[in-house]
Image (cartoon, rainbow, N blue to C red):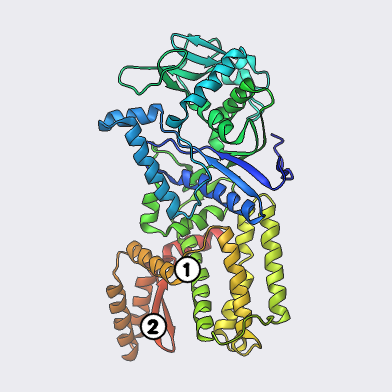
Amino acid sequence: MSRSKELFRPRVEGRVGMYVCGVTAYDLSHIGHARVYVTFDVLYRYLQHLKYEVLYVRNFTDVDDKIIARANELGEDPLSLSSRFCDEFHADMAYLHCLPPSVEPRVSNHMDQIIDMIKQIFDNGCAYKIDGDVYFSVDKFSAYGRLSGRKLEDNRAGERVALDSRKKNPADFALWKSAKPGEPYWESPWGPGRPGWHIECSAMSAAYLGYSFDIHGGGMDLVFPHHENEIAQSCAACRSSSISYWIHNGFVNVDSEKMSKSLGNFFTIRQVIDLYHPLALRLFLIGTHYRSPINYSNAQLETASDRLFYIFQALHDCEEILRQNSEINLEDFPPKDTLDCITRFRSEFEYSMTDDLHTPVALAALSEPLKIINDLLHTRKGRKQQKRIESISAIEKEIKNSLTILGLMPSSYHELLLQLREKALKRAGLTEEQVLEKIDERSSARKNKQYERSDEIRRELAAVGIALMDGPEGTTWRPGIPLDIQEKLASVSQ
């Protein structure tokens, strides 16, 4: 409401109530949804890290015009269709490492609460009935527009819904819609029908968190009219209703254009994770501050994927060296310079996360500890350092803690690296066998001093995102950023 950063003070010490608007379950979720729920998952995780007891409520809209239209297209029962897409959403959230919320209410299970709230609004003189429909009268709520900053007269033209001449004010919105033939309906004091979109969130948030709670969140597109209407309804039902903090994440653009089905630049989460690891998508999403717009592109996903491989290759190498040196007592303190690195990293990480979830800065803080780990693992000077194993163990533990808070920790480093390699092969259109054949061909070319052919093979593979690594034990490969994307990124940075 203040349009500025505010110190977070929960209403009840040590406890947080948080409501986030969920999906309308009629189709697979897209990368815009991924951004919303990854953002609030990071907030949920960080509040828990700060030892708050969080009641996180995220709803499903399973009764809606879009659901009914899609069900009619497919010849399916609307509630059956929405239930199926709720399950698909859960699968997407699991892929993205989003923790389940505390409660996931569905509209279809909360009709009593919705009807009761509409009654309260009606009884308080802020709603009216026309032909079985019930509308909220925005003229009865003088503070309408304070969240979005829009004045009531600004809302009269260009409404998002079709103009209804029966309404007292074009900005009035439906609380209850009378039943149409062939649609699901519920009995109410105003006749059979179903709720309008906005009332469901007011009713369900009040049911689980009360009329006043700490955090209400969602995408920027919900500020108006959805959240504006929620405030009006909730205050009309209960004058003391208030939300302490409204939090909205920025839009997702695709190649610098707004994502939309009409432009053909609309990607579902499933389409993206078919070619990129879900954690690469998550890393990409938290690589921009949540309130800023984010630009989705293959180049950004390739960069995130490459960074993910680098992080977890380093941690996998740590795991291996610690396993090989399991006899060393890791309770011993590492050297002072290691402790200083850990203190700096922890301070930067905590400060940036506490500063309105500045995840890009938190991620950037990983660079120093990762560099030190790689030096200790692979350089001549690093291998000679005193208490090397203790240092590796202490830094790895600190990095793991921060990655867990960010929701980026896999169950196995080894499995993640394998999965990243599989995705890279799929994007390259190659099999592991074909890559190994190319490596053998290159080795033969080098033995025969055919250096041009050797370089050509390296370039061919690099062009499709397969990077060759020459070492004392031979040549191996790892996922890399395709050459054309590297060149684009280099030209942008210049």
Q: Which mark is residue 475?
A: 2
Q: Nearer the viewer, mark 1 or mark 2?
A: 1
Residue closest to the far front? 112
Instruction: Decide if residue 159 is in sight here.
Output: no
Query: What secondary structure is found at the residue carrying circle 1?
Result: helix
The quadrant the N terminus occupies is top right
Seen from the viewer's position, the closer of residues 378 and 41 is 41
Could you give the CA–CA distance between mark 1 and mark 2, rounded to whole angstroms? 18 Å
**Around disc 1, counting alpha carbons within 10 Å, would you say few (fewer than 14), some (14 to 19), or many (20 or more)?**
many
| Residue 315 on image: x %, y % | 52, 73
Mark count: 2
Instruction: Decide if residue 374 is in sight here.
Output: yes
Contact (Cβ within 8 Å) of mark 1 with mark 2:
no
**Around disc 2, counting alpha carbons within 10 Å, would you say few (fewer than 14), some (14 to 19), or many (20 or more)?**
some
Q: Which mark is residue 467?
A: none
Residue type for callout 1: Phe
| Residue 130 on image: x %, y % | 47, 9
Q: Which residue is drawn at 37% across and 63% down?
A: 423
Query: What secondary structure is found at the residue carrying circle 2?
Result: strand
Residue corresponding to mark 1 = 309
| Residue 442 on image: x %, y % | 32, 82
| Residue 39 on image: x %, y % | 56, 48
Q: Quadrant of residue 183?
A: top left
Residue type for callout 2: Thr
Label 1 or label 2, whichever comes before in sequence order: 1
Seen from the viewer's position, the closer of residues 287 and 470 is 287
Q: Residue at x 60, y 41 (%)?
A: 18
